[in-house]
Amino acid sequence: MSKRVAIFLSGGGSNMRALVRSMTGDHPARPALVLSNVAGAGGIAWAGAEGIATEVVDHRPFRGDRAAFEAALAERLAPHAVDIICLAGFMRVLTAGFVTPWRGRMLNIHPSLLPRYRGLDTHARALAAGETEAGCTVHEVTPALDDGPILGQARVPVLPGDTARSLAARVLEQEHVLYPLVLRRFAEGDRRPVMLP
Ligand code: GRF
């Protein structure tokens, strides 16, 4: 039976779209849910139009009460009988209370070559540090931010004249290749890291 995948996002969801498009044919997983903390997230409209179940849990009414927000997330998630969660531009930090029960079943994509540049503004920080290469990482989610076993990385060169924006665009293209590749292997039970190119 296919694995059921929930994808969590906060924005346009280009990674979500790459994941959804990949889950066809003999792929061992299928999209079961797209969930966002932002009602107007472009990815929610797209997923709804594709006929995928969607849920929105706005974090703002919880006023920083992460435990209550995460309880609401868990409640909305439960009916969808999900096997794997893919975080794809989900801009809320999840605490151990949510993460621990999903240990080994939740992935994240981060736009840097972890363990370098955890957190935000990765491209600007990589440029400021004079890096000659950048990239993205898919990893298992653990309670520590942007940590957890690495399942795959894709590298791109930093080019002369790069801005955070141009570098982000080059990395994002690779995110769309790497994340579907890793998810497919992960859904098949293969956790050996993939390194691209
Ligand atoms: C991606 O760069 C992802 O790595 C980061 O947030 C961005 C989301 O982009 N965590 P999108 O919503 O998938 O287009």
Image (cartoon, grey):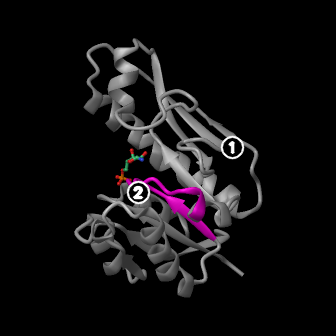
Above or below for 14 versus 76: above
The residue nearer to you, when weighing 52 against 107, is 107
Mark 2 residue type: Phe
Q: CA distance from mark 1 to mark 2?
A: 19 Å
Is residue 147 rendered to the left or right of residue 132?
A: right
Whole-percent x, y for residue 11 in the image: 30, 58
Mark 1 residue type: Pro
Q: Is residue 71 visible?
A: yes
- Quarter of the image where one finds residue 100: bottom right
Residue underneath mark 1: 149
Would you call the spot at circle 2 few (<14 residues within 10 Å), some (14-19), or many (20 or more)? many
**The disc label shown at residue 90, or none:** 2
Above or below for 91 versus 160: below
- Quarter of the image where one finds residue 50: bottom left
The residue nearer to you, when weighing 126 against 187, is 126
**In magenta segment, residue 92:** yes
Q: Does mark 2's beta carbon lie closer than 8 Å to ligand 1?
A: yes
Q: Earlier in the sequence, mark 1 or mark 2?
A: 2
Residue positioned 47% across, 45% down in the render = 175
Residue range (magenta) = 84-97
Dots 1 and 2: beta carbons under 8 Å? no
Image quadrant in which the N terminus is located: bottom right
**In magenta segment, residue 47:** no
- Quarter of the image where one finds residue 23: bottom right
